[in-house]
């Protein structure tokens, strides 16, 4: 379904329409002068039922939110991005195919940003997201290796020996690795 501006709207099933409304190539309007800075402004906290009516989201706000989510993929290449954040981002990109139709899935974020006339990107149009996933998968091993190399050798060995246990700990506590490193530094290593 398309609205009066020719942008995708929410279909009854909760998915974004698959038709790309930007058939003609043109320069899109800028969301903000600095699209990333304005989109990252703090949002009022939800303080409960007494906080008043739900905020009105414009179509531009929704496209900006999809853009902000996609910008997280860029952080994968930065070795200083927290390890847990990289894992969560990769899980979002490579989610189960049956979740691809959900409103803020990686696939729908790419579709909204590439097809909306309100997108901060130039016109891309509808395309197969599997090509983009392949590109990310090609670099993901290097990005993760660069992040692991920043840790002390004993953490690197733990990650190589039992990554599932470390990932389970990170799910419970995103600061798990930092806490273990601080503890070892403050207590000293008995076997060093």
Image (cartoon, helix red, strand yellow):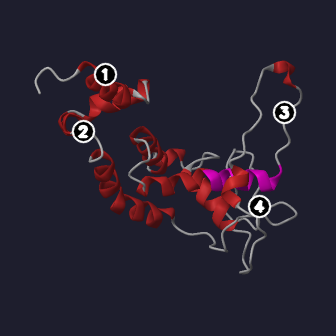
**Residue bearing the label numbered 3:** 54
Residue carrying label 1 = 183
The CA distance from mark 2 to mark 3 is 46 Å
Please tell me whether mark 3 or mark 1 is closer to you in this view. Answer: 1
Earlier-in-chain disc, 2 versus 4:
4
| Residue labelled with disc 2 | 152
Which residue is label 4 attached to? 32
Inter-mark Cα distance, 4 to 3: 23 Å
Q: Earlier in the sequence, mark 4 or mark 3?
A: 4
Q: Secondary structure at mark 2?
A: loop
Where 83 falls versus 172 (above or below)?
A: below
Q: Quadrant of residue 67?
A: bottom right
CA gap between label 2 and label 4 equals 41 Å
Q: Quadrant of the N terminus?
A: bottom right
Left or right for 140, reference 156:
right
Residue located 60% across and 50% down the image: 69
* Pointer 2 or 3: first along the chain: 3
């Amino acid at each position: 379904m398309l609205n009066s501006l020719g942008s995708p709207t929410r279909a009854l099933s909760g998915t974004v329409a698959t038709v790309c409304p930007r058939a003609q190539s043109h320069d899109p309007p800028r969301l903000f002068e600095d699209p990333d800075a304005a989109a990252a402004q703090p949002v009022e906290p939800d303080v409960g039922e007494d906080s008043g009516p739900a905020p009105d989201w414009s179509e531009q706000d929704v496209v900006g939110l999809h853009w902000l989510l996609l910008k997280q993929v860029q952080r994968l290449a930065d070795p200083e991005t927290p390890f847990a954040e990289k894992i969560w981002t990769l899980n979002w990109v490579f989610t189960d195919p049956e979740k691809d139709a959900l409103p803020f899935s990686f696939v729908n974020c790419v579709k909204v940003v590439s097809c909306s006339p309100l997108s901060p990107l130039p016109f891309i149009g509808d395309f197969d997201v599997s090509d983009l996933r392949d590109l990310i998968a090609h670099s993901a091993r290097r990005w993760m290796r660069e992040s692991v190399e920043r840790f002390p050798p004993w953490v690197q060995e733990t990650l190589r020996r039992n990554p599932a246990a470390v990932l389970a700990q990170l799910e419970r506590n995103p600061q798990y690795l930092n806490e273990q490193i601080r503890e070892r530094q403050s207590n000293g290593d008995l076997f060093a």
